[in-house]
Image: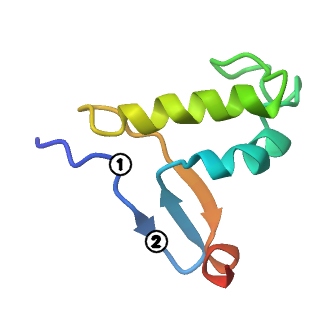
Amino acid sequence: MQHKGTVFLETDRLILRRFDTEDAYAAFNNCPSDTEATEFLRCDTHKDVFETECIFKKFIKAYDKAGFNNKGIVDAYIFNFK
């Protein structure tokens, strides 16, 4: 099987795409800053948005590596509205 990288996927309702550093603020406020939401995840609760941004920067560097496939989930309506 050949690694295709983190491929952009779109349905009528959702978009799966690579993370971008501009996503850090929205992501931080959605999950990583909440201790209850991160309780069963493999990552610790983020202390601030800069921690989330640093992790996204690591993701961005890793996108070209075989086997790395982290995607952000975006509401297609909001994404296409921008």
Residue drawn at 77 percent across, 25 percent down: 38
Of 45 and 12, nearer the camera is 45
Q: Amino acid at mark 2?
A: Glu
Q: Amino acid at mark 1?
A: Thr
Q: Quadrant of residue 37?
A: top right
Of 37 and 66, nearer the camera is 66
Residue 49 image point, x, y percent: 79, 34
Residue drawn at 62 percent across, 28 percent down: 54
Residue 67 image point, x, y percent: 29, 31
Left or right: where 4 falls relative to 35: left
Q: Secondary structure at mark 1?
A: loop
Callout 2 environment at 10 Å: few (<14), some (14 to 19), or many (20+)?
A: some
Residue 69 image point, x, y percent: 39, 39
Checking the image for residue 63, the label placed there is none
Checking the image for residue 10, the label placed there is 2
Callout 1 environment at 10 Å: few (<14), some (14 to 19), or many (20+)?
A: many
Image quarter where the N terminus lies is top left
Residue 12 image point, x, y percent: 54, 81
Query: Mark 1 or mark 2, which is nearer to you?
Result: 1
Q: Which residue is mark 1?
A: 6
